[in-house]
Image (spheres, rainbow, N blue to C red):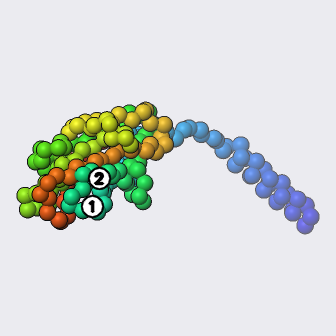
Amino acid sequence: MRTTFTRCMLACFGLVAAVHAQAATVTGTISSTLTLTAACQVNGSTGTTGLNFGTLNFGTADALFSTVNGQVLGGGGAAMSILCSAGTVPVIKVRAGAHDGQSTGGTRALADGAGNYVPYDFYTDAGRTTLLAIDGTIALPTSTGVAQTVNLYGQARGKAGLPAGTYTDTVAVELSF
């Protein structure tokens, strides 16, 4: 019986060796691809239309004010933030507003909806000496992939005969990169 067991074991080992001797290995590769396109975020949001570049809020003043200043603020009460893909050169173009040229004393105007206008302008410096014209551009440095702060300021000018009320304007903005 011991001999039969030994012969069975040897036969099994032989069968296993024969199977291993017939096994083959095949090698190859897997190709992986990802194509990235240039992109930007404005105040943390992405998209191609309808982005909120911020709000210029002059606050509250009496109807006899001479000038009031404001700054365009993005989300969270901070200055506008632009985050673009590394290597891109973002350019912001501040286009026309809804009431441009309706009032002397500024290139833009806030309207109360009853035919009254408050003139105002955008500036690229806190001292409000560098006027940003309609269709004016703000060129940012080449992006490193880190958000860039964009400071944009406004100044509204009072004039005689303005009635109390809420005055608004909507200005188009483009970002190219």
**Figure quadrant of the C terminus:** top left
Q: Give the answer, above or below, for where 50 lies relative to 24.
A: below
Q: Is residue 21 left or right of residue 75?
A: right
Q: What residue type is labelled 2?
A: Val
Q: Residue at 31% of width from left, 35% of height from top?
A: 130
For label 2, the residue is 68
**Local secondary structure at mark 1:** loop
Mark 2 surroundings within 10 Å by alpha-carbon count, few (fewer than 14), some (14 through 19), many (20 or more): some
Rendering quarter of residue 29: top right
The answer to whether one can see residue 176 in this image is: no
Q: What's under tag 1, amino acid-wise?
A: Ala
Q: CA–CA distance between discs 1 and 2?
A: 8 Å
For the point 22% across and 49% down, which residue is it? Answer: 157
Question: Nearest the camera: 101 or 37?
Answer: 101
Residue at the image point whose x is 35% and y is 50% from the top: 71
Q: Where is residue 80 in the image (x, y as percent from the top left)?
A: 38, 49
Question: Crowding at label 1, few (<14), some or many (≥20) Cα neighbours within 10 Å?
Answer: few
Which numbered disc flags the more N-terminal residue, 1 or 2?
A: 1
Left or right: residue 69 compared with residue 110: right
Residue at numbered disc 1: 61
Q: Is 5 located above or below residue 169 in the figure? A: below
Quadrant including the N terminus: bottom right
Secondary structure found at label 2: strand
x and y percent of residue 63 in the render? 20, 61
Q: Where is residue 96 in the image (x, y as percent from the top left)?
A: 18, 44
- Asked whether the residues under the numbered discs 1 and 2 touch, taking CB atoms below 8 Å apart as contact, a structural biologist would say yes
Percent x, y for residue 53? Answer: 32, 51
Q: Residue extending furthest right? A: 2
The residue closer to the viewer here, 28 or 164, is: 164
